[in-house]
Amino acid sequence: MNSVLIVGGSAAGLSTAESLRRKGYQGKLTVLGAERHLPYDRPPLSKQVLSGQWEPERATLRPATALSELDVEFVLGDPAAGLDAATRTVHTESGRDLRADSIVIATGVRARTLAGQDGLTGVHVLRTLEDTLALRADLLAASRLVVVGEGVLGAEIAATARTLGLDVTMVGPQLAPMAAQLGPAVACLLGDLHTDRGVRLRLGTGVTGLPSRDGRVVGVRLDTGEQLPADVVVVAVGGVPATDWLAGSGLTVDNGIVCDSRCRAAEGIYAVGDVARWYDEHLGTLIRLENRTNATEQAAAVAGTILGADEPYTPVPYFWTDQFDVKIQVHGTVPTGADVTIVDGDIADGRFVARYSRYGRVTGIVGWNMPKQARLRRVEIVNALATVQ
């Protein structure tokens, strides 16, 4: 093997390059990135960078010296525009043609937007470093923020903005923040946390419009007919896999790049990170994960496959979120209707671990200000998965 091209310059792309080198690959490595920045971390964008605790440069994943030692050619600020799968050639917007023996696609997702959002001043999404800096500048000059979206990102932005002193309202269709990720019981506790810290929750509601005046947003219109006033609006309603550039490539694209259990999309072509939708042999279905941990673990698995390993990728999903003074860790999955048991700590003390089970099998562990104990409980998920093989 002489060359590997990684399309995507964020965490999944960099992790793939590092894993290849760590596993002994000595051939040519190229990373093609749509953004002009060297690889940076996204989780701090909605927290430390948005709050101003970190300078933007601190989110950079590796110092320049470490990147130099990787012996990787970074081609930045030039998005991929097309792929010829047969010849394994990527065409870029600037007109470059980059060919490699193996291609790893790590293009991630783009932020989903609302109808009527484009062109309105004061309406933001948060995906890139530029998004974060633009939002922070607007927040510092504003007093009222409405966050549209009650998932992980929306809840984090609401918490950060509230610590900056803004009047914050969170809206969305779920009945509690992160209900899909935490289940109703723990999500209600998170809702109480936000309410106690001054965030207004208008949940169980949809958004029908973004009223504006002279090209700037002035509020959010709910499906109840009510209009919430706002100086700034953040739309945090999920991401769309960045696959438009693959039209005509021959790859199967359906809510991500469809891959086999080795994360292989076609001969010599792989996908990692948020954009990959692969067959999980433990679960018996296609899945796609949008979290930082998966980006690293999947990259290591694909690097091994490129170098000759033949193991299915079957992770135990994991993500974390920090909101106000609470740290939440989620291992595994939280299926609808799961039975929830507090197995460590006490809700009343603000420190606990919850076990989620379905049909008597442990599927998930959630830690609330108890990261070590939650991590130790992860083995219960691993053991449960082993019994169904």
Image (cartoon, rainbow, N blue to C red):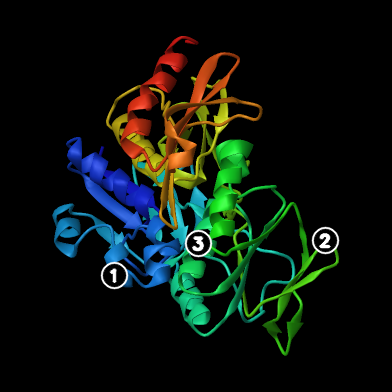
Mark 3 or mark 2: which comes first in sequence?
Answer: 3
Q: Amino acid at mark 2?
A: Asp
Q: Which mark is residue 57?
A: 1
Residue 94 picture location, percent across and down: 44, 70
Q: CA distance from mark 2 to mark 1?
A: 41 Å
Along the line of sight, which residue is nearer the eye, 363 or 243? 363
Could you tell me which secondary element the residue under label 2 belongs to?
loop
Could you tell me which secondary element the residue under label 1 belongs to?
helix
Residue at image mark 3: 159
In the displayed structure, would residue 6 be above or below residue 118? above
In the displayed structure, would residue 175 be above or below residue 339? below
Q: CA distance from mark 3 to mark 2?
A: 24 Å
| 332 sits to left or right of 371 | right
Quarter in which the N terminus is drawn: top left
Residue 329 picture location, percent across and down: 42, 40
Name the residue located 56 percent from the left edge and 45 percent from the top edge: 189
Residue 292 picture location, percent across and down: 40, 47
Q: Nearer the viewer, mark 3 or mark 2?
A: 3
Mark 2 or mark 1: which comes first in sequence?
Answer: 1
Q: CA distance from mark 1 to mark 3?
A: 22 Å
Residue found at the very far front of the displayed protein: 348
Q: Amino acid at mark 3?
A: Ala
